[in-house]
Amino acid sequence: MLFKAIASYAMQGRWKAAATTAVLSALAIIFPPLNYLSSGVISLTTLRMGPREGVRVILATLAVFALLAGFLVGQLWVAGLVLLTSWLPVYLVTLVLGYTRSFALSLLTASGLGILVVLLMHVFIPDTASWWQQMLRPFIDNLSQQPSWQLNAAQTEQVSIRLSGLMTGLVAAGVCLNAILGIIIGRAWQSQLYNPGAFGTEFKQLRLGKAPAVFTAVLMAMALTTFGRYVPWLMDCLPVMLVVFGIQGLAIVHAIVTIKQKSKAWLITIYVLLVIMLPQMVMILASLGVIDQWFNLRARSEKSGTGI
């Protein structure tokens, strides 16, 4: 009910939508997942009110959030960072959804934005791993000084090197995930407010296609070999594709639970495991999403009836 109330309030006008988005983005400084809700508001207003009004909401949000950021952290540039990494990506992906009515194409567009982030970083920063190591140095040094930190200097350095090599892909995956969750939340709110049940059907039918699946499978195979280290820019695309096919895997799980008429406890279990075993579950769900492009697991579930 709270989420529906947020959506209903945001739909009462441009400035209420902007205030809702800005406040959620400001609270995300303390609790980051709230940023997905702010992206959802932008997606909802763009889907319901049109692209032009979506731009106006983003501009109004930028003005409000800049004031909040200046007051809370004293850094106006934070507003620009959120604009580039959160609001603009979800707006662009929402445009694709609005014009094409294709949820799959929207998700692939989000993955394209993530890959664009990877390419831009490798173009402008020749050695991204070293750059990230310098950026993370203050954080690692502060962490290593904590009483609970049990690694020695050599082990801490290894953690820093390993994390630095992953950061470009993780940042790109974060941009992709924010855009995807933004349109999921926005579309779900639109369905809840104006066409109940429509989003659930769309989501369970999600299918991304064989070409992206082949690309993802190749990246996964390369990650298991030494060849991947010679093309770091390509390996940085893997987290992005794991995110998009992880969402595909979730859609399959939701569909099979419905087809098999299973308890919602199955879905709750999946989401709990996502929280406590995120890397492993993303890999499992992404693999499920890739395999489904050839084996159509939902159709097989329908043929096998309601049994286990």
Image: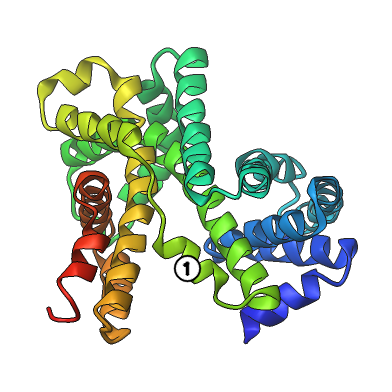
Whether residue 117 is visible here, answered yes or no, is yes
Q: Residue at x 45, y 39 (%)?
A: 171
Q: Quadrant of the N terminus?
A: bottom right
Residue 62 pos. (x, y %): 80, 48
Q: Quadrant of the C terminus?
A: bottom left
Q: How many marks?
A: 1
Taking depth in this image into account, of 58 and 250 the one nearest to the observer is: 250
The quarter holding residue 164 reads top left
The quarter holding residue 218 reads top left
Taking depth in this image into account, of 18 and 186 the one nearest to the observer is: 186
Image side of residue 19 versus residue 160, left or right: right
Q: Residue at x 20, y 35 (%)?
A: 220
Q: Indicate whether 285 appears above or below 19.
A: above
The quarter holding residue 170 reads top left
Q: Residue at x 35, y 21 (%)?
A: 233
Q: How is the image coloured?
A: rainbow
